[in-house]
Amino acid sequence: MNVIKNIAVYCGSSQGLDPYYMTAAYELGEYFGTHQIGLVYGGASVGLMGAVANGCLSKNGSVTGVLPNFLKKKEIEHAGLEKLILVESMHERKLKMFELSDAFVVLPGGLGTMEEFFEVITWSQLGLHHKPILILNWLGFYNPLLKLLETMVVSGFLKKENATLVQVLETSKDLLQTIQNYSPSKTEKWLSEGNV
């Protein structure tokens, strides 16, 4: 069983058009706080990012934000955080979030969320880490992405074993159990940590 102390959440700085997304993000934060799981996220006070942070804080949970200096005003930094780490670039932000986290959860979002997801799953595929990655597929938001992963497998561009590096849930109800029971694929793509 995986020991999980901190989970990075990748999600939108927008709130989306359906109010469900904000409600579900807040409830996920509450879930983290209730289960004493530290939240690591992008440090903003707006959109799904702000909602998940506020939910965790409402249960006296531990929240660490990681925010590039140049986004302080654009993403409106969260003033109520226990810890806000300021970095110089997006690359530093992603690396710091990776280093601080034992697992990764992907919520609805835009291009930035996709970039974070694809980087962390690519690192897993290459054997650079074996941390659990989970998508919360609220309202079927990620159905097209999951279909694309299937197409990659069928077309011979992605090994079936590597497609299963990401776990998928519809709600956060069994999130912690799913992450704790995660067993990484033994199939790596060419590289291992020792020769990178």
Image: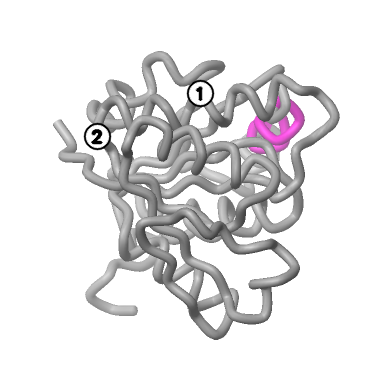
Residue 76 found in image quarter = bottom right
Tag shown at residue 27: 1
Left or right: 34 as drawn, with respect to 23 = left
Q: Residue most toward the right?
A: 17
Can you say which quadrant of the picture contains the C terminus? bottom left
Label for residue 146?
none
Callout 2: 10 Å neighbours few (<14), some, many (20+)?
Answer: some
Q: Position of residue 194 (x, y in %)?
A: 22, 75
Picture coordinates of residue 121 (x, y %)? 49, 51
Mark 1: secondary structure: helix
Q: Earlier in the sequence, mark 2 or mark 1?
A: 1
Is 25 on the left-hand or right-hand side of 186? right
Q: Residue at x 52, y 17 (%)?
A: 171
Where 84 sits versus 19, above or below?
A: below
Residue denoted by label 2: 36
Membership of 176 in magenta stretch: no
| Residue found at the far bottom of this picture | 88
Q: To which quarter of the image does residue 90 belong?
A: bottom right
- Looking at the rendered structure, the kind of residue marked 2 is Gln
Task: Sort mark 1 into few (<14), some (14-19) or many (20+) by Cα contacts within 10 Å.
Answer: some
SS at mark 2?
loop
- Splitting the image into 4 quarters, where does residue 127 fall? bottom left
Position of 45 compared to 33: left or right?
right
Q: Residue 162: x and y, percent?
A: 46, 42
Q: Which residues are magenta?
A: 143-150
Q: Residue at x 38, y 24 (%)?
A: 175
